[in-house]
Amino acid sequence: MTLANRAVFLDRDGTINEECGYLNHPDRLRLIEGAPEAVALLNRHGFKTIVVSNQSGVARGYFPEKLLGALHDKIQALLKAHGAALDAIYYCPHHSSVGEPPYRQDCECRKPKLGMIHRAEIEFAVDARRSYMVGDKLSDVEFGKRAGCKTILVLTGYGKGEWEYNREKCPVKPDYVAADVLGAARWIVNDLKNREQSPR
Ligand SMILES: [Mg+2]
Ligand SMILES: [Zn+2]
């Protein structure tokens, strides 16, 4: 298998949609301003756009897994209205110590483990080393770095607090800090141009 595709992996809560603690009903869903334009821009430049989201609220019993299906349908519908589409929305419903099996398990898919990246390698022939990870937590940055991606921290969601108060504690630095996901997408498109001009 040749891993040929570039992806932009996107965290969900605080990156694509407004962070509101545990998002437990479709009526609470609000996209972050510029998110549809960001996804459309990445679509146009040939990136696979793949959400990678920890959703331990399922394991914790806060909401059923089927709610995630309803939320993700709504996200795709809101994006589609702007001509944008996510190629996939991956999530981890597990937690290693809370709830009951099968959701209580030490899985391979909960970030910062790389299970969701490995799934994208198989399903979309994504090369993580040519890809990007965008998220609002420094743990998203660590996750992306471990996978070999370039990483962007957005200042929406938890991002501003993470950057202001926690960055000294974080062993890795993002390649870029963006105001929001649209800023991240614009930086990525520009970075891709530089990469294509000079062979890595
Ligand atoms: Mg987040
Ligand atoms: Zn999992």
Image (spheres, rainbow, N blue to C red):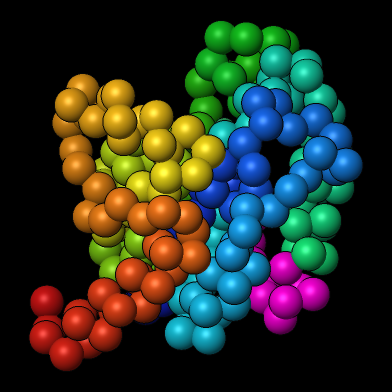
Q: Ligand 2 lies in which image quarter?
A: top right
Any part of residue 123 in sight: no
Q: Which of 156 and 78 is in front in this view?
A: 156
Q: Is residue 170 left or right of residue 83?
A: left
Residue 173: horizontal and vertical position, in percent?
20, 43
Residue 83: horizontal and vertical position, in percent?
71, 81
Q: What predominant SS class does the magenta segment belong to?
A: loop
**Residue 156 among those drawn in magenta:** no
User: In which quadrant of the rendered view does residue 65 lie?
Assistant: top right
Image quarter where the N terminus lies is bottom left
User: In which quadrant of the rendered view does residue 75 lie?
Assistant: bottom right
**Residue 80 among those drawn in magenta:** yes
Any part of residue 198 in sight: yes
Number of marks in the image?
Answer: 0
Q: Residue at x 41, y 54 (%)?
A: 179
Q: Nearer the viewer, residue 197 or 200?
A: 197
Q: In this view, does 39 lie to the left or right of 121?
A: right
Say if 44 sits above or below 182 in the image: below
Q: Which residue lies furthest to the bottom in this view?
A: 197
Say if 173 sits above or below 22 in the image: below
Q: Residue at x 22, y 87 (%)?
A: 196
Q: Residue at x 82, y 57 (%)?
A: 73
Q: Which residue is drawn at 70% across and 26% down?
A: 22
Say if 61 sits above or below 148 in the image: above
User: Which span of residues is magenta-colored?
Assistant: 79-89
Residue 74: horizontal and vertical position, in percent?
82, 56
Say if 84 sits above or below 90 in the image: below
Residue 191: horizontal and vertical position, in percent?
26, 75
Q: Is residue 200 left or right of residue 69?
A: left
Image quarter where the C terminus lies is bottom left
Q: In this view, does 129 lie to the left or right of 86?
A: left
